[in-house]
Amino acid sequence: MDDHRYPPIEPYEFGMLDVGDRHSLYWEVCGNPDGKPALVLHGGPGSGCSEGMRRLFDPARYRIVLLDQRNAGRSTPSAAEPVVDLSTNTTAHLIDDIERLRTHLGVERWLVWGGSWGVTLALAYAQAHPRRVSELVLAAVTSGDRRETDWITRDMGRVFPREWERFRGGVPADERDGDLSAAYSRLLHDPDPAVRAQAAQDWCDWEDTHVSLAPDAEPYLSVADPAFQLAFARVVTHYWSNGCFLADGQLLRDAGALAGIPGVLVHGRYDVSGPLDTAWALHKAWPGSDLVVIGDAGHGGTGMTQAVVAATDRFADEVSRA
């Protein structure tokens, strides 16, 4: 396997799923049609799925399902459109969308993989529908708590003071001591396309900064296509400024609902944007979870990919719970 992942693979089935509220979601299926079902939940929120995510699973043993969440990736309407209404894009909507897709594909239960924001969504989905989840494999663990978003948007100014000062300076002076994600969200919906584009660039510059401590980290969002930057930044600020549409502390508080679901948590020691304490607290609260700490990884990287593939390989031949 190249870089610890399976070789590139193309979907054998794909489509657009009408989930109501004028949303149509892109989905695809790869691998073995008779294999163990696995669902991929991308990060961001707002980034969409990538071809590399298909390669985290053995295509001979898994039926791999990828979904672009509302307003992200190839789903419509795109958050990159000049004017877009995100009011029907919430965590509860996404959970319902996952269930619609599961029913549409005739899946009884599936392994769920999530990365970064995808971890928060995977946990929320598994707690809402535990009988539909056979296992969880979660990388770069997040819980969507205000403490986490405050850490990223404000407290990490202590680690990257020059870059944070520039990030904070991107919003109007009277909003710099408030919720920066909400301030950026307003700029990202400004009628002036130049204002929107600058806000998206500033947000993405900061995103690349706070995930940059891993030895193999490379710029990603800050050098992305401007339309992708706008879509990504609009969705993530929409979620963060609304507390990820979860009660604060909800996912850790309700971790007992995961009892009986085997899980692997993979987290990088150098992940300054998502400190290890969230993964540790979840592991302690979730009977049956394993925590794998990658000593030289940040918010992603080769070591984490290797651990994720090891986890999906481990679960590949296990029979789903009755």
Image (cartoon, rainbow, N blue to C red):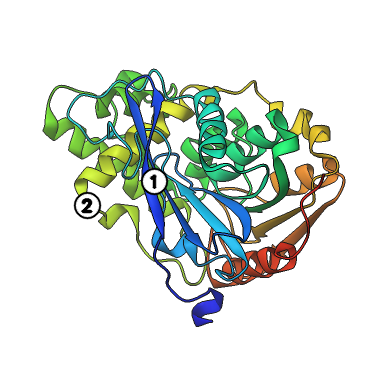
Image quarter hosting the C terminus: top right
Residue at position x 65%, y 61% in the image: 269
Disc 1 and disc 2 in contact, CB within 8 angstroms: no
Measured as percent of width and height from the top left, residue 102 is found at 56, 39
Neighbor class of circle 2 (other Cα within 10 Å; few <14, some 14-19, many 20+) is few
Q: Which mark is residue 247?
A: none
> Which residue occupies the foreground of this view, 293 or 38?
38
In the rendered view, tell whether residue 145 sits above or below residue 6.
Answer: above
* Mark before the other along the chain sequence, 1 or 2: 1
The amino acid on which the numbered mark 2 sits, given as a three-letter code, is: Asp
Q: Quadrant of the N terminus?
A: bottom right
Classify mark 1: residues with Cα within 10 Å, few (<14), some (14-19) or many (20+): many
Q: Amino acid at mark 1?
A: Ser
Please, what secondary structure does the residue beneath circle 2 have? loop
Residue 133: x %, y % from top left: 70, 43
Q: Which residue is mark 1?
A: 47
- How many circles with numbers are drawn on the protein? 2
